[in-house]
Amino acid sequence: MEDQAPPVTVRGAFGRRDPDARGYFGEFGGRFVPETLVAPIAELEAAYLDARSDPAFEQQFTSLLRHYVGRPTPLHEARRLASALGASRVLLKREDLAHTGAHKINNALGQGLLAVRMGKRRVVAETGAGQHGVATATVCALLGLACDVYMGVDDMARQALNVFRMRLLGARVHGVDAGSRTLKDAINEAMRDWVANVHDTHYLLGSALGPHPYPLMVREFQSVIGQEARAQCLAQYGRLPDAVVACVGGGSNALGLFDAFIDDSAVRLIGVEAGGEAIEAGRHAARFAGGSPGILQGTRTFVLQDDAGNIGATHSVSAGLDYAAIGPEHAWLRSSGRAEYAHVSDAQALEAFQWLARTEGIVPALESAHGIAHLRELARESSPPELVLVNLSGRGDKDVQAVERQLRPDAAGQEPSL
């Protein structure tokens, strides 16, 4: 039964579980923007709500997902990984096999089509690990849009391959040498660009963050992940998983997976944050472990900050998880008790990076390796879940050189232990 792969049928792409009229999920979300962006944000919201109710827009989006992105992505049972971890059964949703190598293409494509619909001819974006930047540059090349991507210079150094890929695709990549020189600062610069050029430019935000309608819009463009995974699990295994797991930076890949299982109360929703070097100020990016409610870059959510509200420094071996805030819908899911959140360290993620490569022949993104690492904790529970589904949000080609630097003694010949 598990070896069969019947066609996947999913519901429509849009229009489920909206925030309230002000853009809040419970007490989290909203729209905190300068006056110059009030009208552009209102225009974006109106355009998105109109587009998602238009069957022609949905058909165009879903057709490109199938014929350009390569969806549906497969669901793979990782038997050797499960055996090595002492787990029951582990399923991997293979977003790493989507065009450009990560889930980011789903949202970039949706927003790119929306930009064209709005008459915008230029796109600006931010990126941390580079995958959103690559996805955005790809979509802009496909649709004939000018593309400018902002990236912290520290992230550019550790993701040099993706910087070259963006430029190869025709994007202009701007290094940001301010603040922490990572994702938060790249978002600041992208938003400044947008403020100055709103007449012809769309800001293609890469995660379920920012002012309303971005958290809603990004989650809906990513919801195809969970729709497919749910249908595939039922078709291939005749049941739903006991738990679904995903890494969480801003949180788009996790929300894309969680979305289809929200109403299935027996399915645990587990997000995994970056525990970094230690849960100490400036040494991690685990917002629920060390943060508090606050406002950052347009939304109210959980933020790493000091008692005076100053945004704290962050650290993660993974550039895509190295951010001081989490998406507001995640904050709401946690406060409501519907989802649970854990964190794993840099060392655990690096170990998981190797586990998956050596047991399944799959090199994961360092972001995704955080979700894989948490499987060991689940296996140690007194009543561990029997069937776990992990979103493998991206592939690890971009991270190989960074991991080699971290594991240089092993790279020189000493075998790392599994």
Image (tube, grey):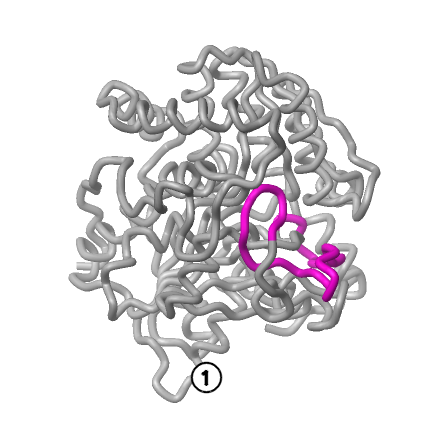
Horizontally, is 307 left or right of 5 in the view? right
> Residue 101, image x and y in percent?
51, 39
**For the magenta stretch, what is the residue range?**
295-320
Q: Nearer the viewer, residue 65 or 36?
A: 36
The image quadrant of residue 111 is top left
Q: Is residue 77 above or below residue 148?
A: below
Q: Nearer the viewer, residue 322 or 388?
A: 322
> Residue 174, image x and y in percent?
75, 27
> Residue 6, image x and y in percent?
18, 45
Horizontally, is 17 left or right of 172 in the view? left
Q: Is residue 106 above or below residue 378?
A: above
Q: Residue furthest front?
A: 35
Residue drawn at 74 percent across, 72 percent down: 280
Kind of residue at disc 1: Arg
Q: Is residue 211 above or below residue 204?
A: below
Q: Is residue 207 above or below residue 365?
A: above
Q: Main secondary structure of the magenta part?
A: loop
- The N terminus, quarter of image: bottom left
> Does the stretch in magenta take in 322?
no
Q: Is residue 60 visible?
A: yes
User: What residue is shown with label 1?
Assistant: 380
